Image (cartoon, rainbow, N blue to C red):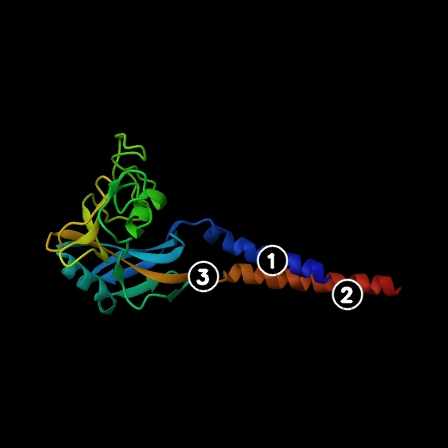
Amino acid sequence: MKKKLTALTTGLVLLGMSGMAQAELTTIGTATYSGGEYNLIWDDDNNGQSVIWLDVVNDPASWKDQNAWATGLESQLVYNIDSAYAVTWTDTAWRLGSTVDGPYVPGYDGSTTGGYNITSSEMGHLFYVELGNPGEYDTSGDPQSPCGLINTGEFNSLIENWYWSGTENSNLYAWAFNMENGNQANPRKDNLGLGLALRGADVSAVPVPGALWLLGSGLTGLVVLGRRRKEVNCD
C-alpha cells in the first residue's frame, strides 16, 4: 500500500513539474513599467544561474546611466506574476548582464574576452544558447549567413544594436554585446548603448488545484481499496 501511495504522489508531482523542467525561456508574468505591460522572462539556466529578464529595452545612454537605470527599476515596477509560479529574488536589485573581464582579446571560438560565440556572458548566453542565434562568424572564423537576431523567443522588445553589460573593464571602458552580429567588445563608457535588465531569482511551480484534487481523490480511492481488500482477507 505504501509503495502505491508513493508512486502516485511522485507521479503527480512530476506531472506538475515536467513543463518547468524542460523550460529554457518561460514568460512567468508581466511587470507594469511607464504605463506599459512587459514580459518577465524566466531563464532557468544561464551559465548555471536562474535569472529573470525584463522585456524592456532602455533608450541609448552611457554605461554609467544604463547601470543607474537598471538598479533603479525596482521602485518603478509593479509585478503581475502568474499564479502558477512562485518567485524568490536572489539578487537585491535589477542589473545589467555580467561577463568575464580581462584584457580585450578577440576571437571566434568563444574562449576569448572579445569577439564571437562567447556564451560565458549572460547576454551572450541568451543570444547564442537560449535564443539559438548565429553570430556573423562561426567558431572557425568563417562568415555565416543568415546571422544576427533572427530569433527573439519570448522577447518582444529586443532589437539589433549594442547593449551594455554591467561589467567594467577599466576607468574608460566597459563590456558590451552586439545583438546585430553576436560580437562582444569593450567600447568607451561614454559611448551610447542600450540597456537590458535581469535579476537573479529562484522560480518554483505552485501546485495546480486540479492536480491537488486528483491527488486527494486518488489517495482516498486507494485507502478505500485497501480497506476492502483487508475485509476480504479477514474473511
SS under mark 1: helix
Amino acid at dot 3: Ser
Query: Of the residues shown, which amino acid type is indicated by label 1?
Result: Thr
Query: How far separated are the C-alphas under marks 1 and 3?
Result: 17 Å
Q: Residue furthest left?
A: 190
Give the mark nearest the N terminus, 1 or 3: 1
Is the C-beta separation of discs 3 and 2 under 8 Å? Answer: no
Q: CA distance from mark 2 to mark 1?
A: 23 Å
Q: Quadrant of the N terminus?
A: bottom right
Looking at the picture, tell me which residue is in the foreground, 119 or 5.
Answer: 119
Q: Nearer the viewer, mark 2 or mark 1?
A: 1
Instruction: Pinpoint residue 2: horizontal percent, then vertical percent.
Output: 71, 62
Which sits earlier in the primary sequence, circle 2 or circle 1?
1
Q: Nearer the viewer, residue 229 or 203?
A: 203
Tag 2 or tag 3, which sits nearer the N-term?
Answer: 3
Spot the residue most to the right: 235
Q: Is residue 190 left or right of residue 73?
A: left
Q: How many marks?
A: 3
On-image quarter of the C terminus: bottom right
Can the viewer see residue 234 in this picture?
A: yes
| Separation of marks 3 and 2 at Cα, in angstroms | 36 Å
Where residue 227 is drawn, which disc sits there? 2
- Residue displayed at 36% across by 46% down: 130
Residue 34 visible to the viewer: no
Q: Which residue is mark 1?
A: 10
Percent position of residue 214, x then y: 59, 59
Q: Is residue 222 above or below residue 119?
A: below
Query: Badge 3: few (under 14), some or many (20 or more) residues near its Cα, within 10 Å?
Result: few
| Label 3 sits on residue | 204
Given contact means CB atoms under 8 Å apart, are the residues at marks 1 and 3 in contact? no
Q: Amino acid at mark 2?
A: Arg
Q: Which mark is residue 149?
A: none
